[in-house]
Amino acid sequence: MKQGYFLTIEGPDGAGKTTVTQRVADRLIKEGYDVLMTREPGGIPIAEQIREVLHDTKNTAMDSRTEALLYAAARRQHLIEKVKPAIEAGKIVICDRFVDSSLAYQGYARGLGIDEVWSINQFAIEGFLPTRTYFFDINPEEGLRRIEASDLREVNRLDEEGLAFHKKVYEGYHILMERFFNRIVRIDAGKGIEEVEEEMYTHIRQELTMLY
């Protein structure tokens, strides 16, 4: 059986990571790789139900710690029900968001503390981390502009936060890039979609060449 491979995609809202990642996954599948695309929060029924609560724009009273705990709960169920079994079966699992999102959004931008939110998530993931994380780097102003211009993208509760919040998220991600420099690879998401796709695809193919 081939070795499984777990990689995650991160970035501010509006970075275009979901669209680009699907295109890259489609290319890998055409080349014969066994690829599973999934997302957080969500990916399985229980986590999708939690996603609805987290993203509901009416839930303005949600406490920041409640938010962090719900993300961790959704992550745990998704990990044990879908991600780990797929990796154990030798699949390439590409997950749209994982623990770094919680560290940037709740840990840094919400002010709960990166280490505190890391601790919550260590309980959830038991040290299980991706081999590689691709960070789609785009400034918050451009990301929000893209969201406003799109008729297709789901607008959630976090999207409706002000620019100051999204700037903190961006700062948080850059702190994580320094902290986890051996795992996180920066992708310039300010380029055109074809260029971003090619950059991400090239990185992943280099990784896969070493693995298989």
Image (cartoon, rainbow, N blue to C red):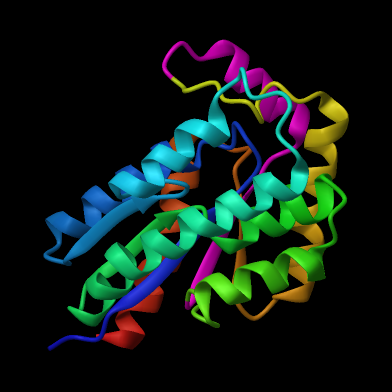
Q: Position of residue 188 (x, y in %)?
A: 62, 48
Residue 129 seen in render: no
Q: Quadrant of the N terminus?
A: bottom left
Question: Is residue 141 covered in magenta?
Answer: yes
Q: Is residue 150 left or right of residue 15?
A: left
Q: Tell me where residue 144 sits by quadrant.
A: top right
Most foreground residue, 112 or 97: 112
Q: Which residues are magenta?
A: 131-152
Q: Is residue 182 above or below residue 198?
A: below
Which residue lies at the image location 42% right of the left edge and 47% below the top edge? Answer: 197
Q: Is residue 208 left or right of residue 20?
A: left
Q: Position of residue 25 (x, y in %)?
A: 28, 53
Q: Quadrant of the C terminus?
A: bottom left
Most foreground residue, 150 or 129: 129
Which residue lies at the image location 54% right of the left edge and 66% below the top edge? Answer: 133
Which residue lies at the image location 50% right of the left edge and 45% below the top edge? Answer: 196
Q: Position of residue 27 (x, y in %)?
A: 23, 52
Question: Is residue 133 covered in magenta?
Answer: yes
Q: Position of residue 117 (x, y in %)?
A: 73, 63
Which residue lies at the image location 27% right of the left edge and 80% below the top edge? Answer: 4
Q: Is residue 83 left or right of residue 135?
A: left
Q: Is residue 2 above or below residue 60?
A: below
Residue 179 seen in render: yes
